[in-house]
Amino acid sequence: MEDNTKTCTPAGVTKEMFDKLDQFIDSLGINKESSRRKGDLIRILHQAQHIFGYLPEEVQIHVAKKLNIQHSEVSGVISFYNYFTTEPRGKHNVAICLGTACFVKGADKILEEFERQLGIKAGEVTEDMEFSIDVVRCIGACGLAPVVTIGEKVFGKIGTADVKRILDGYKSEVQK
């Protein structure tokens, strides 16, 4: 069945990405009539976010149709879990913990320094799509406060003076 509801596709989202997602969903062998199909939704959304980098409405609608469920069910799961995002993130997502232990040790100043160095605010992405900044409430590494993660890498006990050095390491990687 052809989907004619897609009138606008977000920048950077391609047919190949949708094809890759479809291959993943099809590989799961989901019966669209089974009530158990919703059990695979989180797994599918993880894969979709991995493919697209985020979960724009067009992707949400596509997943809902593939699973024969309501778009509201998909968006409800996305809004419930912090892992999922409906906004594009940079290739290097900087997550600054503002939980109590980190905040007490100056994480708010570290956030300000990342914002100054990158020229963006929390929740935004740089024009070149290389960096984005998110604020999180707890990373679970309070002993390393203040804590910042970039992708899977954890930086602990950092100060504002460390921000430039950390970013320079990623910027040199971008220039390679």
Image: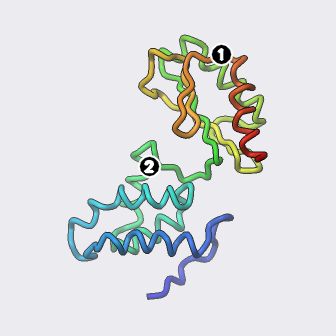
| Three-letter amino acid code at the position of disc 1 | Gly
Give the residue displayed 76% in from the left and 39% down from the top.
Answer: 172
Q: Classify 10 Å Cα crowding around label 2: few (below 14), some (14-19), many (20 and above).
A: few
Q: Position of residue 146 (x, y in %)?
A: 55, 18
Q: Residue lying furthest top in this view?
A: 104
Q: What residue is disc 1 on?
A: 159
Give the residue displayed 21% in from the left and 72% down from the top.
Answer: 34
Find the distance from the CA under tag 2 to the CA under tag 1. Answer: 32 Å
> Quadrant of residue 52 in the image?
bottom right
Q: Position of residue 18 (x, y in %)?
A: 52, 72
In this view, 84 is above or below 51: above
For the residues bearing labels 2 and 1, Cβ distance under 8 angstroms: no
Q: What residue is disc 2 on?
A: 79
Q: Toward the viewer: 157 or 176?
A: 176
Q: Earlier in the sequence, mark 2 or mark 1?
A: 2
Q: Report helix, strand or loop for mark 1.
A: loop
Tell which tag, 2 or 1, sits nearer the viewer.
1
Image check: 12 left or right of 17?
right
